[in-house]
Amino acid sequence: MKAAMAIKIPAKEKSFRAKMIQSTHDWCNENAYDCYIVVEVDDHCQVPRQYVKKGQIAFSLHPDSCQELTFGKDFISFQAMFADGIEYIAIPIERVASIFESEEQKGLVFEVAISDKAYENSVDGSKNEQGKGNNPIKNKSLFKIIK
């Protein structure tokens, strides 16, 4: 398996982050890659909580997986099918921790500020490390940072 590649984008670059997320998604579609995002969930994220693990949730942005996908300067929103039915998803741009294509794992990793309103419980009821002030993306990443 090839080493994953990523570029790290600082948390304060919100408008740049929004453009890079949309551009990466477009690039994935143009090259027939499956595009995924990983979200650091907090109270501002509208996601199905039962699928959040260790404060994170991943979504496929493939057209077969989500409908009405909208990239705004502040939010990404779409509808996704889960076991319980269709869910409306709304994610603040600053909560997106990474976007990547799954085949070669090329993508972008973003710094996510620790939120006072972080979603601290995982599916199994254990406390998330994020509640202790640690960022799981920084501590255990799928990506190799290229400088």
Image: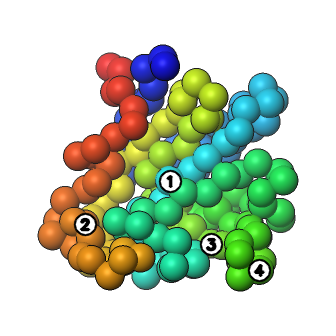
Could you tell me the amino acid type at mark 1? Val
Look at mark 4 in the image and give the residue it sits on.
Answer: 85
Q: Secondary structure at mark 1?
A: strand
Q: Position of residue 102 (x, y in %)?
A: 61, 35
Q: Please name which of the two marks, 3 or 4, marks the residue nearer to the observer.
A: 4
Could you tell me the amino acid type at mark 3? Ala
Look at mark 3 in the image and give the residue it sits on.
Answer: 90
Specify the quadrant that holds the C terminus.
top left
Alpha-carbon span between mark 3 and mark 4: 16 Å
Look at mark 2 in the image and give the residue it sits on.
Answer: 130
Residue 62 seen in this snapshot: yes
Q: Nearer the viewer, residue 36 or 91?
A: 36
Q: Earlier in the sequence, mark 1 or mark 4?
A: 1
Answer left or right for 125 relative to 47.
left
Q: Earlier in the sequence, mark 1 or mark 3?
A: 1
Q: Residues within 10 Å of mark 4 (few under 14, many from 20)?
A: few
Total of numbered circles in the picture?
4
Q: Residue at x 57, y 50 (%)?
A: 37
Q: Position of residue 13 (x, y in %)?
A: 42, 48
Q: Residue at x 48, y 17 (%)?
A: 2
Q: Earlier in the sequence, mark 3 or mark 4?
A: 4
Q: Position of residue 57 (x, y in %)?
A: 50, 63
Q: Residue at x 28, y 54 (%)?
A: 136
Answer left or right for 99 relative to 118.
right
Look at mark 1 in the image and give the residue it sits on.
Answer: 38
Q: Is residue 113 above or below residue 143?
A: below
Residue 23 seen in this snapshot: no
Tag 3 near tag 2, CB within 8 Å: no
